[in-house]
Amino acid sequence: MNIELLTLSEVVDVNGQAGNFTVTVRKNPRYIDMDKCIACGICAEKCPKLVKDDYNLGLSRRKAAYIQYGQTIPLKYAIDPETCIFIQKGKGKCLACEKFCPTGAINFKDREQIVTLNVGSVILSPGHKPFDPSVFDFYGYGRIPDVVTGMEYERMLSPGGPLHGHLEQPSNGKTPQNIAWLQCVGSRNTNKSDNGYCSSVCCMYAMKQALITETHIPGGGRQTIFFMDMRCHGKEFELYYNYAKDKNIQFMRARPHTIEAGPGGVGVKMLYSTEDGRKVEEQFDMAVLSIGLEAPRDALDLAEKTGIRLTPYRFAETGDFNPVASSKAGIYIGGSFMGPMNIPSAVAHASSAAACAAADLVSARGTLTRKKTYPPEADLAGQAPKIGVFVCSCGINIAQHVDVTALTEYAKTLPFVAYAENSLFSCSTDAQGMMGKIVKEKGLNRVVIAACSPRTHEPLFQDTLKELGINGYLVEMANIRNQNSWVHQKQPEKATQKAKDQVRMAVAKAGRIFPLAQMEVPVVPRAMVIGGGVTGMTAALKLGDQGYDTVLIEKSDRLGGNAWQLRTTARGEPVRPMLEALIAKVKGHRRIEVLTTARITSATGSVGNFTSDVEADGEVRTFSYGIAVLATGAAESVPVEYLYGQDDRVVTHLQFDRLIADDPDRTASLASAVFIQCVGSRDENRPYCSRLCCTHSVKAAVDLKTQKPDMAVFVLYRDMRTYGLNEDLYKKAREMGVLFIRYDLENKPQVSRDGDRLVVRVTDPVINRKIAIDTDLLVLAAAVVPNDVADLVSIYRCATNQDGFLNEAHPKLRPVDMAADGLFVAGIGGFPKPLEESISQAQAAASRASVILSRDVMYLDAIKSHVTEHCDGCAVCLDACPYQAISIIAYAENGRTAKKVETDKALCKGCGICQAACPKGGILVHGFTIDQLQAQVYAALDLPN
Amino acid sequence: MRAEEIRLGKTRKSLFKDHVMSILPDGGNLNLCLTCGACASGCPASGIGDMDPRRFLRLAAMGADDEILSSDWAWWCTMCQRCIYACPMKIDIPQLIFNVRASRPREQRPKGIVASCDAALKHDTCSAMGVSEEDWRFVVEDVLDEVRAGQAGFEKLQAPVDKVGAELFLNQNSREPVTEPEEMVPLWKILNLAGADWTYGSKGWAAENYCMFMADDASWEHIIRTKVKAVEDLRCKAWLNTE
């Protein structure tokens, strides 16, 4: 409602400055009236012009009247003027779309429009361009049919793609059995390409593709990934890598030189040398080139129009301490336009950019926003259920494996069902509109959606009902996609039968659901930020800047955290001045109250209205607040190997940073230095990668070489994970003569003292030779370990992962939200990351938090426990409740004292344990009452209830 | 695995690799190796003598100078440049090899290559087969006569030697005039049919340059200068080397 979407549009010019930009936009004609188009698809069906489908990278064809893909937003067709017969050839030609469009939406008089927008902030998120591998003639892309790019393969693998997920070898149409992936194609390469950086995402996408491929080929087939370093530097990525190895994905540390076509032009053939120098010739059915990410094609043009600076790689230039701010005030960058990154980072950066953009506009906040209002709810009391069933095809996601027509017909036969229909995407705006119309026309008072997960889509359908003046809880969903079509792809008949069972169950329950009232909670416009490191301070500052009172709690006696020990960022920006300025700003901020030597001891309430006791300097104070940001941080672990603690010459990263800062003469006098990576990371005890150590070591090595160019510097590593633009530093280190030697977990370096000498022994896998390095300094890349948050976990009922890092609600789509509403996580308490990424997350958390804080009232979910007249106060439920939401009360009844329980709606999460524990129906949970569940069970067994 | 450890660190000496880097533009990128093995995968000489380009460069990086300088692998490598072509870092391994060859005492270099270079230095023909100017002229004229007499349509075939002012100065690998003289004819025919204005020289005509392969800079330079002079003496506009 507060987002205006301009599609088919290009920025022509940006003028003005922060707070007052004039953006000129060219809106290209769609030739289809968006208000009239119902996305029925008849225009595309009737259009005679077949053209290459760019979305599927030319692997399929579409019509000149088209939508890019099923989930297009807005779901409105467009006519491609480059290929439309009428537009190209003029009068008297074709017009099939116009003739058949049932709503008269076709408009060939549509013309380009120039739109001028007055805005206060600008966010640029033009994305990236996939690398074109044809420059590497030795890979045969474009010449050998069975060589495809990772992007093409992604489409081939997609159930919504041109092959409907049924893999085919391009040369002969057969199911490929043996597929090879080649990593770093157009990344980490400065020969015939200028992409010296690491594209950051390809190791993971290749692994994902290999694992999915395994499920798409009968018998699993064989998948081989040829790589230089496996870069699994994200949260739980290393687990995924280990899982892939367990699933028998072959990881081959080798780089084929040339790909040749297989016999008869089918498949591919390649020769490669293993790390230990064996030469292997192997044939594969297909080769997938894991192409990298480049700056968008029009980056230069966009930079010129907006006046922002680009890096030599043509990504947007940003600063480490202002990670989403472009070089021009008021213009912010979201996503991979600032360098290759994965989805979680891009989403966090986007929120971060939103926070910065909003902070600039704080004085005008609310002046242009619109609020949604709903008609008053109709009273349905006494009405018999009149159920409408809406079966979604989800494009082909469901329809491909479930007979949706039969399912719809079946639904019509069920009790109380007054109407049933099938649509392509029930969630599309148009389908929602149609649904509303039908509910009104037919006088429906319950709705069953047979589609996907209520987790993602229930709110949408609830909203549709509310817009009609019907209580939102009168919708029931049957998840025939995630729980059916996706898992029973090979048994369409059984899948259809199961879908019928699911719909029958949902209808049975729908007959017993009733309107529920949401509780309104006034939002306390105050933020609680826990952790006074750079992350916490940044979050507090962004919240304070937006005008929210913020309490910043730090357990130690000073703000700053780990940053006090850091010297510079990877790109060389000094940390100390930034830190001191940040602390001064936070302390001087009129909206921020800083409490040091403080800890939170309790928390009650829920999103919008928490109350906590905070103990600071022996004094307890109580705060109420609307949201909390958990920026609890992490610490460097203490190594237990490599003579750490036994020899002064053995230090950790942070100790090294202090040493080179405090005593540069000493480091400059060293003849040699050795770094050992993965000390306490990626092993049995800590299976995760600590993400920041490779870059940190490489930066430190470069600093040593800068101090003293003839110093012998070595880095002993397992996989160099200088992801993204950090790869430049790795290259620089090699250029300066730093020698990198790989080791395996099974064959770790040995450190010993030989008289006065400190000797590190390692076997170089390429020459298979023992190397003994005499060193003056040994720096250990000690693992990053999360701070102990057990108390907070218990206070807030939140969770950490198996490694002790705080969990986000969704690793990709909600990277800074926590599962419990109103709680946010940022910084290295969530997962190790360098300072600039922590800052970006802190800003993202502030942005997400302000979505709540900017409201006056929050509506709580109505799925809550409810005490009935059967309760006799036996208190069985009290102990069963994991949220301490139930208490016992005494009341007078017929002159004597009786007992019963009472639930706190704000604390109750609607989990249902109380209902299960109660032997007498004394407590129930709305939306999942015993009566409703029983109806579903009977329906599942097809028994009369 | 060779038993002895490579000792690095404080004892690190001046390295052969550093010497080579100092004479190459951008240091030949020799420090940039990612040890990915694309070179080894594509090298025709990989595996010979348990060596490949990646290992060779790695030994150089480790300062195992004695091993690489004494390794015969530098002579198994043909400096074909397949490695640098696909190398993500464009590392000039062929130049490393060249300099290893150059560092070998002349008497330890492969006899065949040394003999070919020596032969080329004997005459201004630069022929590694030791063909003299007279023999060369005789062979060309003899073969030409035979073709003119025996092959219909080629009665007027030209194979000029020392034609002053010709457009093209053509080189010829000297194996042909010695062992398979008739193999020279197809190119003559092509040039004649194309109407090219070309000539051989009596001097500097041999296309091969074994002095380059044996990494004898002075002799290599001598050969090149001799050839250049031959082209310039005939005032030809272009020098066409078929090797």
Image (tube, coloured by chain):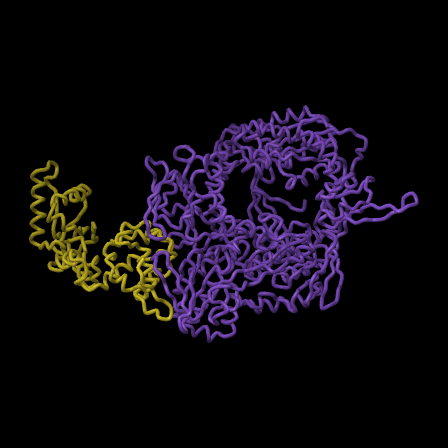
Which residue is more in the foreground, A11 or B69? Answer: B69
Residue A766, image x, y percentages: 35, 56
Residue B119, image x, y percentages: 12, 57
A580 up-or-down from B45: above or below: below
Q: State whether residue A388 appears in this view.
A: yes
Q: In the rendered image, which quarter is residue A107 located in?
A: top right
Which residue is more in the foreground, A755 or A760? Answer: A755
Is A561 positioned to the left or the right of A129 in the image?
Answer: right
Q: Colour of chain A?
A: purple
Quadrant where the image shows the C terminus of chain A: top right
The residue depicted at 63 percent of the width and 28 percent of the height is A500
How many discs mark residues in the rendered view? Answer: 0
Quadrant where the image shows the N terminus of chain A: top right
A64 up-or-down from A620: above or below: above
Q: In the rendered image, which quarter is residue A673 located in?
A: bottom left
Residue B82, image x, y percentages: 30, 51
Is A248 positioned to the left or the right of A585 in the image?
Answer: left
Residue A197, image x, y percentages: 45, 55
